[in-house]
Image (cartoon, grey):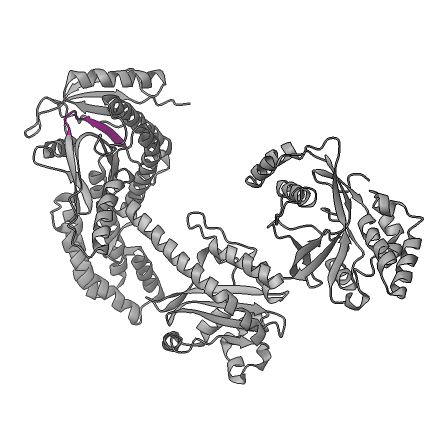
Amino acid sequence: MANFYKKDAPFKIFISFKKYLDVLEHIRYNDRLEYRVNYVESLIEKTKNFQELKEGFQDISLLEKNEELIRLLLADLFPTGLTHNEIKAASIPFSNITFNYTERFKSILKDAGKDFEIEIRNIDDDEMYIFCCCLILQNYFKKDIRTTIPLYFDIPNKNGIMKHYKITVNSDFTEIFPTERSKIPTDDVLDMLLENMDDAKLWKKYFPSEAWILKGFTIISLVDCTSEVALSDLKSSMIKIDLENLTPDENLIEIFKSYFDVSELNFGLMLFNKKDQKLEKVPIYENVFTNHILDFWINTFDEEIRRTTFNNLSHNSKPIVISNVDNLDENIKQLSSFSILKDNNINSFMVIPIMQDNELLAIMEFTSPVVGSFNGLKLKKMEFFTDMMLFSLNRFSFEKNYQIEAIIQREYTSIHNSVVWKFRNEAEKYFTASLGKKIYTLKEISFKNLTPLFGVSDIRSSSEKRFNLMLQDINQQIEWLKNILTLTNSDSEKYLLALEVFENELNHEIKADTEQRFQRLLREEIHPFLQGKLEIRTSKDIKYMIQNYFALVLTQTDLFYNHRKDLDNSITLVNRKLADMLDESQIKAQQIFPHYYERFKSDGVEHNLYIGHTITPDLHYTSKVVHKLRYWQLKTICKMELEFQSFKKDLPIQLDIASLIFVYNEKIDIRFRMDEKRFDVDGAYNSYYEIIKKRLDKAHIKDSSERITAPGKITIVYFGMENQKEYLEYITKLQKKGILEHDVEFLKVEDLQGITGLLALRVSLCQDQS
């Protein structure tokens, strides 16, 4: 029975009543009241045959065998008159074994169920070990310390509500001795230990396991502090908001049950959208929160009354408490929306508006199927919670706005993380000046002497495909219209004739404004004519055909959009996948050396990198950085091409992409354009780089009609032989990895307007990547 204390501890524990028997001996020889002396003598006499009471024992079965004797012995410590009020018991120190309960404690444990095991809440083994060591310091070394770890028991009541009890421990009847294995630390060591209260290994070094002896028993007293603990738990739940990792706290309902002492309870919360004057659900809590009362309220009144009610809340935000739904006014019970309450078995509820500065932030609801669950006293408890809810909602709003700003920054502007520091420096100067009521003019943000890298994966012949698919859509639309109009009366003849003219024009001599004129014919004449047919007596077959026709029409353009939609969906899918790959790979590129990065999606994905000391002045910058990033760029574009080959067969419209890298050795400057909220190449000389980029898109091989880019191949455009040598090394590396073929082409690029002398390397990707 030596290990009834299951956890590691610095002492062996023996149950002993010696110190208490010493107190009784003192009364026996010193008390002047004869009846007290006689009473104590009889108790001491009863213990003579049970020497273990003094010497100590570890066999806990003796507690049960001598239950009556122990009850009599401890009678002074457990007054009969208080047994139904106090929650009290004797216990074996630092274990979950308790005995000699008051009647109230017995009742609490009985309600918890026979399988319930009492355990101290939220204290791990290391904390408990240090706690035990502190007891040695207090008891043996006489150190005046106060352990600050609050101890709690969580015990469910008969209704399943978790009740929380704070434990106070009286250890007056315990004593601690060292053994031969004990180390007696110096005062300096003890002070050092007290400075390291979280270092269990250090404590175990000076207070090894079971190196001391603890004899005695403790008295534990419990105080019901369910409301206080539940309120603390609510605070923790409200404070823990992480918008980057939003997960609903499903314990929230259980905490509310404890706080309000309501066994069957549901909670709901809806945020008030001031702009739209309506309540909105909290998305992450949709499966946890209910909104039955709020749904009932919303469905009871029309839009105008609801808006008026929201406005009136600024003047009278008194909560609503209904103890028994059956006591509601008969007029309300007759409303169809009242069924929301009955269908969800709601018989008692509270509705509490959350206000700040006379403005509505949110509305809470508490509901229960049990009549009488909520009343004015329960509402009173909300006063302690309202400020916390206000804090939580304000923090949620702040975090939400912060995240929205981050999304705008990430998705809609070009202020990349690598250059934010310079914007922040200017913003801080502006802010500091404004605090001192001074005027500060924001300086222009620019970075000089940067090496640019440009790459593009262009969707090939997308304009031509879009034109051909437009013809298919319009021809299909004309065919539908001819079939419908043929079945109508003679009023449609002029439209049939007009459609014939457009059909001929589309397929033989299409003009620049053909599509626009066709749209005008539809919008102004044919569609109003067909709408009229739907509103008058027309055969069901014709109406059905007309309805099916309009289902295929894109409202914004009045045109069929079927085939072009497939193309746009295909382009969107390609762009998203390639852009995601590029963005993910960029994380590794930034680890090589932080740089400014931007990418654009149109019919394909293009990207720019700008590298230089002025962007990252704190790091050592050399030409090796550029070489590493150039290799990264080539490898990444190869992987994007290969990824495209793996999913292109699944596209609604078959597409091809052609990839190009432009190598430019001259340094350039970039400047943030305030009007466009993005960086742009700065100065007339630097604009030469931008001109080349734009003209390379459709450039041809010199003295040829063939484009320099081709599907399934990577094209690298450059000026000098030094770049050629550099990229051939990169290509060789990728050939060894089985990514590129051994078919490198050395090309000359046709002379472009004002641009001559461009060279190119072109190499195929390996198709078999298994």
Taking the image as shown, residue 110 lies to the left or right of residue 333, namely right
Locate residue 191, reporting x and y percent. 57, 39
Vertically, is 613 above or below 428? Answer: above
Which stretch did the figure color magenta? 657-667
**x, y percentage for residue 755?**
8, 27
User: Going 69% across and 59% down the picture, which residue do you hit?
Assistant: 222
Q: Horizontally, is 249 left or right of 91 in the view?
A: left
The outermost residue toward the bottom is 330
Residue 599 placement (x, y as % from top left): 25, 38
Q: 695 and 322: which one is in front?
A: 322
State whether residue 605 appears in this view: no
- Say if residue 495 shows up in the picture: yes
Magenta stretch, overall SS: strand
Residue 42 lies in quadrant: bottom right
Above or below: residue 475 compared with residue 746: below
**Of residues 753 and 678, the one drawn nearer to the viewer in this rendering:** 678
Residue drawn at point x = 34 percent, y = 55 percent: 401
Quarter holding the N terminus?
top right
Q: Position of residue 13 (x, y in %)?
A: 77, 42
Kindly give the residue lying farthest to the left in the view shown: 754
Q: Residue at x 87, y 45 (%)?
A: 52
Quadrant including the C terminus: top left
Residue at (23, 57) in percent of width and height: 558
Would residue 396 appear left or right of 182 to someone viewing this image? Answer: left
Query: Is residue 584 part of the magenta span, yes or no?
Result: no
